[in-house]
Image (spheres, rainbow, N blue to C red):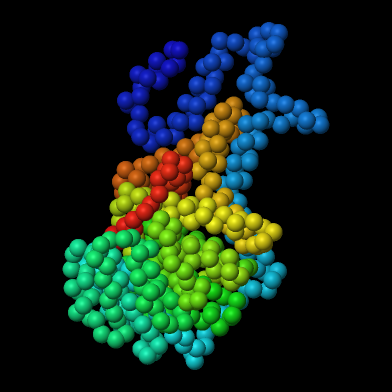
Amino acid sequence: MRRFKALDQSHHSVGYAEQFFFIPHFLKLCKNEGAMRLSGSEISSRPGTRSSRELLRSADGGVEVTVMEGLFWLSAIGVVYPYLGYPVLLWLVSGMLGRFRPHTQDDSSFYPSISMIIPACNEESRIERKIENTKALRYPADRLQVLFVSDGSTDRTVELIRKHEADPIALIELPVRGGKAAALNAGLDRARHDVVVFSDASIELEPDALRYIVQGFRDPGVGCISGEDMIAESGGEAWYGRYELLVRRLESRVHSIVGASGSFYAQRRELCEPFTEGLAPDFLSVLRTVEKGFRAVSEPAAVGMMTSVKDSKQEFDRKVRTLIRGMTALFAYRRVLNPVRFGVFAIEMLSHKILRWSVPFFLIIALVSSVLLIDSPWFLFVSFVQIAFYLTALLAWWGWSLIRRSLPGKIALYFSMVNAAILVAWMKYAMGVRQELWTPSQR
């Protein structure tokens, strides 16, 4: 115990960095302190006495396997496969199928008629910019219908849209806020063209985005096409977004994407059904498309630009809301997880959604099991790496600018925040919480 007293007396003189690197030594010290009372010979001389590591061991076919080690490696696979193994598997399969090339080629003569639905709720700060961006889209006006739907806006959103209301732009005003599903359904009731494009007020589309997003419909087997929403900044959300877009491209080459960009995607009009509030519309569109025997794909050339959510707390809340909506939609359409009926798509859904949503539990198991095994130099190192990663994320969350601006800090913060949001979403979903009303993110 004298060693702990000395440690306590020197605590206030140790800087943050020194405390940070002292963690693995402290863990080792805690382990050794209990062992000081009984030497190895004393332990072995006592009948029936076994070390904690031995207590975890069991023999099977002459090969000793530690239960905790098994849990650690299983959880490590559970973390690595959805984020790294799955994309690598998609890349290998796409190569074997000869689909490294883009799945569509541009045809400048292909212009299906489009009904574009843009829901808006209290968007006065950016609605005019969205209107001007929509006017600048290079698409034949006689083949385009643009429907702005005000979902019970109480600011100047309706007034500003009315200033620009002229063919092809029209306004649908809902007097009472009903949520994003209600706004989209109001737009669908008025949509009269072959393709429906869904877009948020927060995204600015590239001039040729509409022309590119419909190219995939030249394939009669494609029913839904996702655009690519790029984050202008270089923060954690931007890096995670680029990774997600890469996975979607690979999924498109193999079979079908499992989720579309909620801010910009297109669907054949005959496949559109009324949306249900509380279920993520973009995810729901993909599920319904695949259920009806069509594919959903990503179009890399159909690009829109967005800004990141500046406030970490706001981004966390947005993630939780989105996840609850996604979980609600997936469990409502859980039949798509049947590999006998849906084949490759069921495997994609398991890998991209179910296992990805299980990662927080694997992370907890990996940390606890490695800490319990710190008498091994390897697991001592692994414990240190994990704790260092989470401390980096925590310091970035608290606003330490040096860490928050660094690439490791951005990645650690966003990865930790995403998985914490998944954990909170699971807890809320289990308690029966459902996200009924849509709240646009302030970007």
Percent of width and height locating residue 337: 61, 56
In the rendered image of this protein, does residue 176 appear above or below residue 216?
A: above
- Residue at the extreme right of the image, as rendered: 61
Along the viewing direction, whichever of 395 and 114 lies nearer the viewer: 114
Depth check: 342 or 95 in front?
342
What residue is shown at x 35% (from left), y 70% (from top)?
A: 186
Q: Nearer the viewer, residue 150 or 176?
A: 176
Residue at left offset 64%, top offset 34% = 69
Question: Residue at 34% across / 58% down in the picture?
Answer: 438
Q: Quadrant of the N terminus?
A: top left
In this rendering, would 349 be left or right of 280? Answer: right
Place residue 55 in its image quadrant.
top right
Q: Tell me where residue 56 sits by quadrant.
A: top right
Q: Considering only vertical position in the picture, is 25 above or below 82?
A: above
Q: Residue at x 57, y 67 (%)?
A: 290
Q: Is residue 289 visible?
A: yes
Please state the horizontal and vertical placement of residue 303, each as a whole percent of the image.
42, 74
The quarter of the image holding the C terminus is: bottom left
Q: How many marks?
A: 0
- Left or right, 16 with respect to 339, comes to left
Which percent across, then down, holds residue 85? 62, 54
Asked whether residue 212 is in view, the answer is no
